[in-house]
Amino acid sequence: MTVTQATAAKYHLKSIEDLKPYAKDLIIGGPPEFKTRVDGLVGLKDTYGLTFKGFDPLDESGPITLSALVNGKVQAADVFTTTPQIITDKLVALADPKFNFAAQNVIPLVYKSAMNATITDTLNAISAKLTTDALLQMDNAVITLHADYATVASAFLKAEGLT
């Protein structure tokens, strides 16, 4: 769940549960299926007791959703935590202390026959350092700033002492 800095400041929002006194006055946006999913409005009501004033079906964490959020058409939206506009539009991703939304972890795919201890150790070392914030920063660099993938990945590895 993501809101603008203005909305976060106005309602003192840090987590999804902070929305409870205000949800009845807010329009929430997200992909059409968000309306009926447990990791959507159904879960927000069951887990946090949130009932919003309305729901605006938009796209999936894309330009329509982001525009609606930034322009005030919706006051809260389903935005992926690694969407670069969180940085560029200074949005606030609300914490989910009751874990309504499942983790969407990055998982390496490797041919089993190619695996060895060096590859396993390397992937485990990277995985230990690969946080949501690190992914957000790298996505911003590649998607928004048009940096080269290899350059961004190399800089991450170097910064984390993995090269």
Image: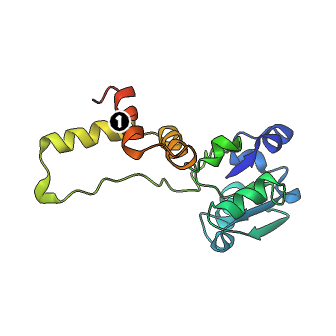
Viewer-proximal residue, 45 or 72?
72
Q: Position of residue 32 (x, y in %)?
A: 67, 74
Query: Which color scheme is applied?
Result: rainbow
The residue shown at (70%, 54%) is: 48
117 lies left or right of 23: left
Residue 49 seen in the current view: no
Against 61, is 124 above or below? above
Q: Position of residue 142 (x, y in %)?
A: 49, 46
Against 87, is 49 above or below? below
Occupied quadrant, residue 42: bottom right
117 lies left or right of 138: left
How packed mark 1 is, by other alpha carbons closer than 10 Å (few <14, some 14-19, many 20 or more), is: some
Q: Position of residue 47 (x, y in %)?
A: 65, 57
The residue shown at (64%, 55%) is: 79
| Figure label count | 1
Mark 1 is on which residue type?
Answer: Ser
The residue shown at (46%, 39%) is: 131
10 lies left or right of 37: right
46 lies left or right of 50: left
Against 108, is 53 above or below? below
Q: Position of residue 18 (x, y in %)?
A: 75, 44
Residue position marked by numbered label 1 in the rendering = 154
Of the 4 image quadrants, the one containing the C terminus is top left
* Secondary element at tag 1: helix
Viewer-proximal residue, 99 or 159?
159
Residue 109 seen in the current view: yes
